[in-house]
């Protein structure tokens, strides 16, 4: 049930909460914020942080932020979304967590906030009486502890005392080898109210997949945001690491966050992707066409790092195209088999390294542009699409340029946000480009 300020106080008291983690998501999806004593949290009613916190790169740098926050580096007001309060089950003491919304002092949303970007897109749907429904699928790797970034990652040891030597797609025994980890993770997810549905072993050695129950995109983005931390915390407690890198091991498949999406009419509750006779609607095909046209332009939100593009490889269960097909996993856009009520579209392009707020916002923005502009998709792809390449950006620089030049996405997502996000990613790329890799030393140092 929603927590009013009074029920929030009652909740904290009933669970004997001593401290509250007050968190926001920056552009990279890293949790930022403060930890406050319970009484201070309740009396203050808000948290203040510099707006520039939202502009951090994944390695802690910031671009020149005058154009985005002004020359004085001002504060923003972070207001708790009381519906998001949760127990932190792995904490040593009784601790709660609350996700906050970023506001200016006049009460307006801070455009640089990823949560605000998703709200902006959802408001556009709401103005037309539409309500998006999404269900993410998240892949990740369990790996052996590794404190040396120059050494390759390896699968961890399970209960058997052995690490996986080959791929164990959908293996029950391979999952059971990490029963203590998954039992505790399941307990944490239940206590943290994350709504996790199913667990499977994916194709890679030590690669797992978690599916979430479908629901409101903002709520699901919150849950994914919190789930990543829950997995990492659980792994640490079991002497291993969990990674959400898109491509952590060169010989293993990458990790994705596939997003299933449909739209319902807010008044009737009907799926607008289906006609009354059960056939696919015009809006369904418009939405598909929007994904085909704009996913390549929004790629920076689906593949936000240099490593992201290593995942997108032919014959490795990761799309290099934006073709669509019925139950066709070689396509970037898949239509799962379902009845008219559950007709939905699966975007298979995003990696699991995304900021969930931005990936949800971007895929919904692409579909929205297709619907309001009445776009027409290509014909369905019935055969394998692995041979189709170069429909998506192949590197971070290309993705930055495409997003920066796409005016329709800038209008939907917010022009200031898009400019700032591109600059953050440019700074990350510049930092990466200064690194001399082991490959360069091995093959160039004495041979050229």
Image (tube, rainbow, N blue to C red):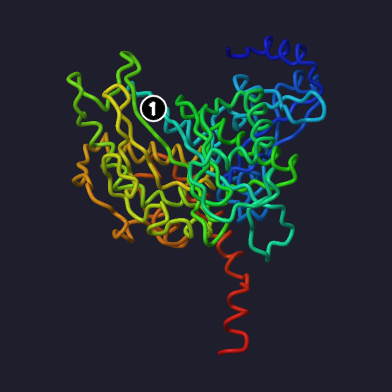
Question: In the rendered view of the protein, which quadrant contains the C terminus?
Answer: bottom right
Q: How many marks?
A: 1
Q: Is residue 340 above or below residue 70?
A: above
Which of the pair 170/7 is nearer the observer? Answer: 170
Answer left or right for 26 relative to 288: right
Answer left or right for 326 relative to 4: left
Which of the pair 219/213 is nearer the observer? Answer: 213
Q: Residue at x 73, y 30 (%)?
A: 21
Residue 345: image location, x then y, percent: 33, 35
Q: Secondary structure at mark 1?
A: strand
Q: Is residue 296 above or below residue 275?
A: below
Answer left or right for 401 relative to 334: right
Q: Residue at x 38, y 41 (%)?
A: 347
Answer left or right for 108 relative to 37: left
Question: In the rendered view of the protein, which quadrant contains the N terminus?
Answer: top right
Q: Which residue is mark 1?
A: 132
Q: Is residue 154 above or below residue 362?
A: below
Q: Residue at x 30, y 32 (%)?
A: 337
Residue 239: image location, x then y, percent: 75, 45
Residue 39: image location, x then y, percent: 81, 19
Residue 163: image location, x then y, percent: 64, 52
Residue 54, quarter of picture: top right
Q: Residues within 10 Å of mark 1 (few under 14, many from 20)?
A: some
Q: Residue at x 42, y 33 (%)?
A: 121
Which of the pair 444/118 is nearer the observer? Answer: 444
Which of the pair 394/191 is nearer the observer? Answer: 191
């Amino acid at each position: 049930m929603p927590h009013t300020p009074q029920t929030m106080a009652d909740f904290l008291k009933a669970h004997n909460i001593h401290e509250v983690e007050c968190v926001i998501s920056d552009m990279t999806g890293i949790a930022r914020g403060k930890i406050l004593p319970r009484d201070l949290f309740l009396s203050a009613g808000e948290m203040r942080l510099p707006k520039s916190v939202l502009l951090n790169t994944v390695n802690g740098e910031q671009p020149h932020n005058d154009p985005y926050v002004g020359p004085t580096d001002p504060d923003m007001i972070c207001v708790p979304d009381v519906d998001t309060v949760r127990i932190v089950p792995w904490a040593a003491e009784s601790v709660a967590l609350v996700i906050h919304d970023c506001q200016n002092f006049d009460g307006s949303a801070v455009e640089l906030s990823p949560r605000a970007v998703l709200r902006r897109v959802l408001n556009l749907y709401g103005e037309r009486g539409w309500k998006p429904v999404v269900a993410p699928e998240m892949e990740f790797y369990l790996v052996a502890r590794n404190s040396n970034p120059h050494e390759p990652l390896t699968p961890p040891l399970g209960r058997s005392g052995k690490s996986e030597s080959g791929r164990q797609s959908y293996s029950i025994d391979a999952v059971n080898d990490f029963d203590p980890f998954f039992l505790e993770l399941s307990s944490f997810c239940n206590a943290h109210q994350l709504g996790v549905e199913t667990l499977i072993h994916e194709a890679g050695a030590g690669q797992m997949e978690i599916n979430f129950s479908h629901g409101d995109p903002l709520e699901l983005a919150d849950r994914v945001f919190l789930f990543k931390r829950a997995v990492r915390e659980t792994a640490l407690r079991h002497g291993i690491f969990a990674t959400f890198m898109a491509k952590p091991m060169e010989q293993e498949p990458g990790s994705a966050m596939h997003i299933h999406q449909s739209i319902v009419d807010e008044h009737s509750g009907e799926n607008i992707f289906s006609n009354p006779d059960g056939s696919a609607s015009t809006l369904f095909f418009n939405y598909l066409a929007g994904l085909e046209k704009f996913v390549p332009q929004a790629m920076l939100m689906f593949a936000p790092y240099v490593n992201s593009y290593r995942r997108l490889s032919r014959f490795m269960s990761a799309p290099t195209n934006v073709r669509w097909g019925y139950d066709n996993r070689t396509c970037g856009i898949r239509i799962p088999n379902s009845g008219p009520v559950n007709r939905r579209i699966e975007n298979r392009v995003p990696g699991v390294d995304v900021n969930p707020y931005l990936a949800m916002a971007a895929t919904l923005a692409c579909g929205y542009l297709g619907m309001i502009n009445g776009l027409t998709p290509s014909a369905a792809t019935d055969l394998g699409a692995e041979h189709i390449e170069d429909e998506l950006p192949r590197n971070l620089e290309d993705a930055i340029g495409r997003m920066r030049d796409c005016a329709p996405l800038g209008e939907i997502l917010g022009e200031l946000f898009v400019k700032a996000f591109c600059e953050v990613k440019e700074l990350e790329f510049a930092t990466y480009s200064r690194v001399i890799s082991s490959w360069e030393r091995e093959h160039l140092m004495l041979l050229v």
